[in-house]
Amino acid sequence: MTDRRQFRDLASPAEARDAIESLDLSPDDETVPLDEARGRVLAERIDATLDVPGFDRASVDGYAVRAADTFGADEADPVVLDQVGTVHAGAEPDVEVTEGTCAEISTGAVMPPGADAVVMVERTDEVDAGIAIRTSVAPGDRVMVAGADVAAGSRALGPGTLLTPREIGLLSALGIDAVPVRGTPTVGIVSTGDELVRPGDDLNSDAGQIYDVNSYTIAAGVEEAGGEAVLYPHAGDDYDEMERLLVEAADECDLVLSSGSTSASAVDVIYRVIEEEGELLLHGVSVKPGKPMLVGRLGEARDASHSAYIGLPGYPVSALTIFRTFVAPAIRSAAGLPAPQTATVEGTMAVQERYSEGRTRLMPVGLVDDGAGETLVYPVDKGSGATTSLVEADGVVEVDADTEYLAEGETVTVQLFSPDVRAPTLFGVGEDDPALSRLIDHVERPRYLDVGSRQGRRRLRDGVPDVAVVSGPSDREVDAVDLGGWTREWGLIVPAGNPDDIEGLADLVDRDLRFINRAMDSGLRASLDAALDDVAADRDADRRDLTDAIDGYGLTVKGFESPARKVLAGDAAAGLGLRATADALDCEFVSLGTESVRVLANPERTDKPGVESLRSVLDTHLDDTVASLAGFDA
Amino acid sequence: MTDRRQFRDLASPAEARDAIESLDLSPDDETVPLDEARGRVLAERIDATLDVPGFDRASVDGYAVRAADTFGADEADPVVLDQVGTVHAGAEPDVEVTEGTCAEISTGAVMPPGADAVVMVERTDEVDAGIAIRTSVAPGDRVMVAGADVAAGSRALGPGTLLTPREIGLLSALGIDAVPVRGTPTVGIVSTGDELVRPGDDLNSDAGQIYDVNSYTIAAGVEEAGGEAVLYPHAGDDYDEMERLLVEAADECDLVLSSGSTSASAVDVIYRVIEEEGELLLHGVSVKPGKPMLVGRLGEARDASHSAYIGLPGYPVSALTIFRTFVAPAIRSAAGLPAPQTATVEGTMAVQERYSEGRTRLMPVGLVDDGAGETLVYPVDKGSGATTSLVEADGVVEVDADTEYLAEGETVTVQLFSPDVRAPTLFGVGEDDPALSRLIDHVERPRYLDVGSRQGRRRLRDGVPDVAVVSGPSDREVDAVDLGGWTREWGLIVPAGNPDDIEGLADLVDRDLRFINRAMDSGLRASLDAALDDVAADRDADRRDLTDAIDGYGLTVKGFESPARKVLAGDAAAGLGLRATADALDCEFVSLGTESVRVLANPERTDKPGVESLRSVLDTHLDDTVASLAGFDA
């Protein structure tokens, strides 16, 4: 624990941006085929080298004529011309139009010699003597002259132009099949930390292993920013291995990102590698989260190509936030890409948020559409170790170091995690329930946070969510519109065969059986406590006496399936849960009753499309859904 | 010309959308590796199958303790515990914490048996007797319990979720390395028309050949909409070839688009193929442009797989407009993708626009930022044959069939050609000039339309563009801020060696020499006419007499290089142009004078960033630019 570096002199966010701007991560320009050019950025100006069209062309189907021959013609008194031939698109005319004659011509065909106008077919008739022309035309009518669209020598597209379908259309018209574009920055990602395992591999939780979240998350972010991500094998905290991987990545990439390790010792190892194999420009930024960010260059000490280097924090939300705020703009700029249009949205704070830590804060927030055109913004603070904040937050609000609080109703700018992120159509909170999670599959882009029934009621009262789903007894009344609900059977989940012969709560109180409970916010827990009150009343005892006697009453777990999984794993004799869960996981079930689950809507949001959608899903899918779950009833 | 089908009973746009919705172009779901999942859409709900974290973990670096041992400890009066071991992240603890002891622990490491809290390292010191703990902690402090982030069995992501970096992060945390996603619709593109040549191949303009614009444009649009484009070899107007290609494409793709041909006879051929090889649901839509759109199914007549079919109009702007309006939404929907957020922008009409044709109109428009936060919208109508409207327009405004006009200042919704499209930073109009086209290379995302000096003055007066660039004499005054300018030497461009010994304008008047002029809007043309006035005055003649005597005075071409190119091609003895052009194209030059080119800014837009940028480019790059061009001077 000695010799650990402390980040005492933290750089400001502006200094961090300057340090990153001083890095060179621009790749060389390259030439790509036109059919792979979409989304790329022109490296050079493109001038037209030919006229478009390259010849005088008919702009309608009809007859090529000498305009002078049509003077005076009209519907009633047509001029009849002698048809001397036909000109098709894509063919060289083999006919000349002389006085008193015409040639049939297709749209886009070359004007035959002698002709100076086209009469559209709708104004003509075939008659015995030839072609009756029923209108008079002027020279140039229905003819597009050579170069009228694009003149040879003119500036077609400027350097730095983002190539969308329309630019690709103009380049096609100019006959260009390969275009000089800005190169794609290659970004190497080295994840570090002895505890990390690649998704798909087996995990040993007893040895503290966790899946590597940052590698794929940041790789996706790199590609969204216009870079090409290169994933390197995961490095442990060993100096030599880390050095070998970082130098290899520096040799092959324009930018190397390290990420993954949350422990200070691993950060120390990286720090030493950068100092010895390159140059460290900055360590530590006065921003929360993200303090341990590193900026530097790598590979300069060796006689090889080198690259820019940025070290990201280890926690996924911190890593993605720092990536989005500091790194993605640098990658976009190296690729020549403009900032995406939807990178930010404006919203109003749904609640007051206090803060005073003397560092710029990148506060993770969620978005709610209030149904009246306003976007509400609420802080999501689950601690940086939680990966679920990745999907529960939509972006960050940058709060100045000297801002003490954001007031409710204050306008803030949210930097979205990705340009594609948008507010969910429905924002629900409350009880964790298997019927609910199936029902919201039918709603487009919902967000549901299983914070429990008690928290659900509290948050609905505060006016942030659209709906709260609650179960179990409560003495808290909330002003809401009841959209419907169902009942579910709850009780004790025990191993198959019920080896301990558990018959009810009395067994937990009176015998030495390990129990797994749910947290206070859960509606199931409220039902359990009410049932314990009944037992206590029967025994003329205090509930506290009973709960003290239950081994594990204070051991609470998060999800509705979690107690059953503990029972399955042999860690407990009984767990609080639903008959449906016991059924799904092949456990035995000791019923203790049923409780009602209600879907309560924010009274001001009942017209919001997402709420309407949930209401109609309840109408159409509730019966099927509860029928598929044991112990559920509509 | 007989038997040509006319589209008399046009479907409404709503009927066209219904017909397209009735087609099935959804591919099968598929499974992709996580590192290729960005931008894809989940086909199924993903439930967590494990707890995250999978064990109780330390959330800081520090010491794992029994909380009870720390009660009463503070800065002044620490408790000293005996360190019995160390637990690293990614390792199974080999130590138990008993009363009076502690274990060093890294962030993310497994809590050792016996410990129930972590004291952060900053609140500890190593002392001779052990580890001094300078704070008291409660059970659970700085510990993240198993499943606290994600509980096994909980709903992680719903079906239909678009996978951005944050969702990929959550999937990583769950150890998922392959995800079930909606398939990517494959869209075959068959371009038709005898006159089309693929970009990159040689073009025979005399035979009326043009480059195929639609294939690559629509392919890029397909990919932008989330489909996979498959380009088929270009088909001529021959029935058998078209049938073979369309059936092959139907066999291999979910949707076949035909495009490219503007001639009614080619459309007839496709029409017959669809009727014989599939089913035609709709022909002709009451929308401008896009009347000849076809909707149907292909390949059903054969015992093979079949596909949806949509026939696009032949003109590129029409094709892209119809694609964007009717086809892209169907591809997105088949891919499960939501409509892009930036698909539309609101703006106000910069001018009045009249219309009454009884068809829904998809009016191509350009966008201008007025510098005061408003987006101005102006119609771009160059005729559907012009490919330049692709880049001069930014999108379309849908105007109802019964709307007679859009008023100036009216709010309209613009459907952008692509989500990445945005208003240019600088919108300039006016004279075609080689110095200008180099200077604006230094401005980010400019748009410049070379409509000539006369049109430039007119449009600046109407208040739409930010700047007009004008040259030559004019009797039209315009209220503007002069940002600067340069002079350019103009005259007659003649073949190398000046074979006709042309010395000035008198040669054109008095001798039989073919001349190529510029159009009336050009500043160069105004300078020429002023010089002809001088010759006329010298001869005591009328200018008209002189111009009648010049062979080709009425033959005007578009670009400033175009006359020189005609001279080079042997089509004329002399062309109106600049010394710089003669120089660049190795022609000889007969000087007739110099004219001043001025950059005039809209007085209300001088603070607009794009105008500021142009002003500073004039400061920094004008001298270098004119020095590189013969006959130019600052």
Image (spheres, coloured by chain):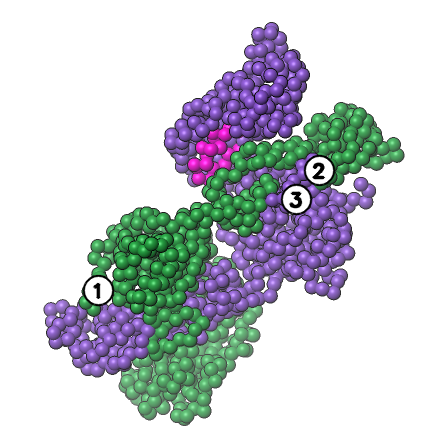
Chain colours: A purple, B green
Relative horizontal placement of residue A600, taking residue A390 as reference (left or right): left
Quadrant location of residue A614?
top left
Q: Residue at x 47, y 78 (%)?
A: B488
Chain to which mark 3 belongs: A
Relative horizontal placement of residue A406, taking residue B572 as reference (left or right): right
Identify residue for label 3: A197
A505 relative to B632, above or below: above
Residue type at mark 2 is Ala
x and y percentages locating residue A173 in the rendered image: 41, 69
Alpha carbon distance from label 2 to label 3: 11 Å
Q: Residue at x 27, y 51 (%)?
A: B12
Crowd rating for badge 2 (residues with CA inside 10 Å; few <14, some 14–19, many 20+): some
Identify residue for label 2: A207
x and y percentages locating residue B529 in the rendered image: 35, 80
The answer to whether mark 2 and mark 3 are in CB contact below 8 A is no
Identify residue for label 1: B4
Q: Earlier in the sequence, mark 2 or mark 3?
A: 3
Q: Residue furthest top?
A: A540
